[in-house]
Image (cartoon, rainbow, N blue to C red):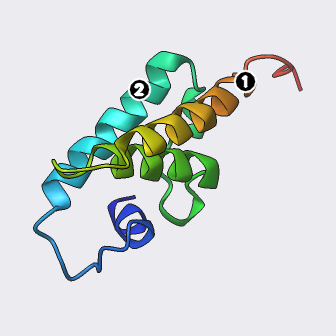
């Protein structure tokens, strides 16, 4: 997921100085989503098959919290919360599993 997040944030893959910070933010974003009630099956990092809506939500979180001098933090945080709310409405996958 790291490389996809970096790409969406406009950070070339050859620049690795931010990788540890971004990895921590990715983990934090996923935990935020998990504790907010986003179903676990959506949060699985499947490389190319990672849920694109989850990836977008993670990118918004990273954009909000990356760096220390950000004037657009609240904008990205609000976008993250809106996307998170939609993901929280997804079915857990437990209903209708009788097939």
**Percent from the top left, x then y, of residue 48?**
54, 66
Looking at the image, which residue is at 28% across and 43% down?
Answer: 65
Residue located 26% across and 50% down the image: 70
**Left or right placement of residue 35 versus residue 73 in this view:** right
Residue beneath disc 1: 89
* Residue at 31% across, 34% down: 28
The residue depicted at 86 percent of the width and 20 percent of the height is 96
**Relative to residue 39, is residue 6 drawn left or right?**
left
Where does the N terminus fall, quadrant-wise? bottom left
> Looking at the image, can residue 43 be seen?
no
- Could you tell me which secondary element the residue under label 1 belongs to? loop
Determine which quarter of the picture holds residue 27.
top left
Farthest residue, direction front: 71
**For the residue carrying disc 1, how many other residues have a C-alpha within 10 Å: few (<14), some (14-19), or many (20+)?**
few
Image: 31 above or below 69: above
Marks 1 and 2: in contact by CB < 8 Å? no
Q: Nearer the viewer, residue 50 or 84?
A: 84
The tag on residue 32 is: 2
Quadrant containing the C terminus is top right
Query: Percent x, y for residue 47?
Result: 47, 61
Check disc 2 and report its element: helix, strand or loop.
helix
């Amino acid at each position: 997921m790291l490389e996809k997040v970096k790409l969406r944030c406009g950070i070339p893959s050859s620049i690795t100085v931010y990788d540890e910070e971004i990895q921590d933010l990715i983990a934090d974003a996923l935990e935020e989503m998990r504790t907010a009630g986003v179903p676990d099956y959506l949060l699985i990092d499947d490389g190319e098959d990672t849920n694109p809506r989850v990836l977008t939500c993670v990118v918004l979180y990273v954009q909000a919290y990356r760096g220390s001098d950000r004037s657009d933090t609240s904008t990205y945080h609000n976008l993250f919360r809106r996307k998170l709310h939609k993901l929280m409405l997804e079915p857990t996958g437990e209903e209708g599993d009788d097939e």
